[in-house]
Image (tube, helix red, strand yellow):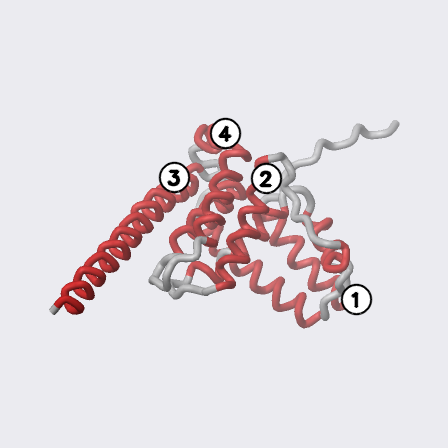
């Protein structure tokens, strides 16, 4: 008697840890492509990839043009999540790339360490009513908006990438762990980001106005 097919489910942090550990073993026995690795992670791998990609931007120093490309990548991931696709899309040329065993080992160790930290700072199935209220689309919008804010071509100011990256980070953790508190942290980070960007914009315009007034007075005098 054949068993009924199981309904697909999103990968959790624990699933990702197992998949990352297995990827290193597969690499040592002959390697695997990036596409095969993503397929092994299963539906929902976009949350892990977005989570990992936030790390270069969380540090307080601006990352220049890299932030523009990274922010647009986040926005693209968020848009796909909103539309219901929770897997990462990559060109076939990249999917068929076969990294070396050393690369897989480093990525596996890093990813497992990151997810271990995620497990310590969050809890599973906490405030589930909020997780259900926000849903995949709501979390996708947080990532999209956070990505656009990361990509904003601001002048070089501290935290201009860090704050919106935290929005994405907390949204991904909240989705992976089904932790409503992380969603609250994502929303709080978004509010702080908008306030900070508003203040920075005001300071820039105020400084420009004062400089122009000083220049006019200097030229007249």
Q: Position of residue 133 (x, y in %)?
A: 47, 28
Q: Which residue is mark 1?
A: 29
- Residue drawn at 33 percent across, 50 percent down: 197
Mark toward the viewer: 2 or 1? 2
Pointer 2 with pointer 1, Cβ within 8 A: no
Judged from the image, the secondary structure of the residue bearing numbered disc 4 is helix
**Of the image marks 4 and 1, the number of the one nearer the N terminus:** 1
Q: Which residue is mark 4?
A: 132
- Residue drawn at 43 percent across, 39 percent down: 183
**Of the image marks 2 and 1, the number of the one nearer the N terminus:** 1
Q: Position of residue 180 (x, y in %)?
A: 43, 37
Q: Report, in whole angstroms, how far the alpha carbon at label 4 lies from the one at label 2.
A: 15 Å
Q: Between 207 and 219, which is closer to the camera in this rendering?
A: 219
- Residue drawn at 39 percent across, 57 percent down: 154
Q: Report, in whole angstroms, how far the alpha carbon at label 3 lies from the one at label 4.
A: 13 Å
Q: Position of residue 11 (x, y in %)?
A: 63, 43
Q: Tag 2: Cα neighbours inside 10 Å, few (<14), some, or many (≥20)?
A: many
Q: Which residue is mark 3?
A: 184
Judged from the image, the secondary structure of the residue bearing numbered disc 1 is loop
**Of the image marks 3 and 4, the number of the one nearer the N terminus:** 4
Which disc is residue 103 wearing?
Answer: none
Judged from the image, the secondary structure of the residue bearing numbered disc 3 is helix
Quadrant in which the C terminus appears: bottom left
In this rendering, the count of numbered labels is 4
Q: Report, in whole angstroms, how far the alpha carbon at label 2 lies from the one at label 3.
A: 19 Å
Pointer 3 with pointer 1, Cβ within 8 A: no
Which disc is residue 81 wearing?
Answer: 2
Mark toward the viewer: 4 or 1? 4
Q: Tag 4: Cα neighbours inside 10 Å, few (<14), some, or many (≥20)?
A: few
Q: Report, in whole angstroms, how far the alpha carbon at label 3 lies from the one at label 1.
A: 43 Å
**In screen coordinates, is 20 left or right of 211?**
right
- Residue drawn at 66 percent across, 44 percent down: 87
């Amino acid at each position: 008697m054949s068993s009924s097919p199981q309904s697909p489910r999103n990968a959790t942090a624990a699933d990702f840890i197992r998949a990352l550990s297995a990827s290193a073993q597969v690499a040592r026995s002959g390697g695997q492509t990036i596409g095969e690795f993503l397929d092994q992670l299963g539906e929902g791998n976009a949350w892990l990839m977005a989570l990992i990609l936030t790390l270069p931007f969380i540090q307080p120093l601006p990352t220049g043009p890299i932030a523009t490309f990274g922010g647009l990548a986040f926005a693209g991931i968020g848009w796909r999540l909103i539309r219901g696709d929770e897997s990462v899309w990559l060109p076939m040329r990249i999917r068929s790339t076969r990294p070396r065993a050393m690369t897989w080992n480093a990525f596996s160790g890093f990813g497992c360490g990151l997810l271990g930290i995620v497990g310590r700072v969050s809890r599973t199935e906490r405030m589930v009513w909020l997780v259900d209220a926000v849903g995949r689309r709501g979390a996708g919008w947080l990532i999209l908006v956070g990505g656009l804010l990361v990509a904003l071509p601001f002048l070089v100011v501290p935290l201009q990438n860090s704050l919106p990256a935290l929005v994405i980070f907390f949204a991904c953790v909240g989705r992976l762990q089904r932790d409503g508190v992380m969603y609250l942290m994502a929303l709080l980070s978004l509010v702080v980001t908008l306030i900070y960007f508003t203040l920075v914009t005001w300071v820039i315009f105020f400084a420009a106005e004062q400089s122009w007034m000083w220049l006019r007075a200097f030229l007249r005098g």
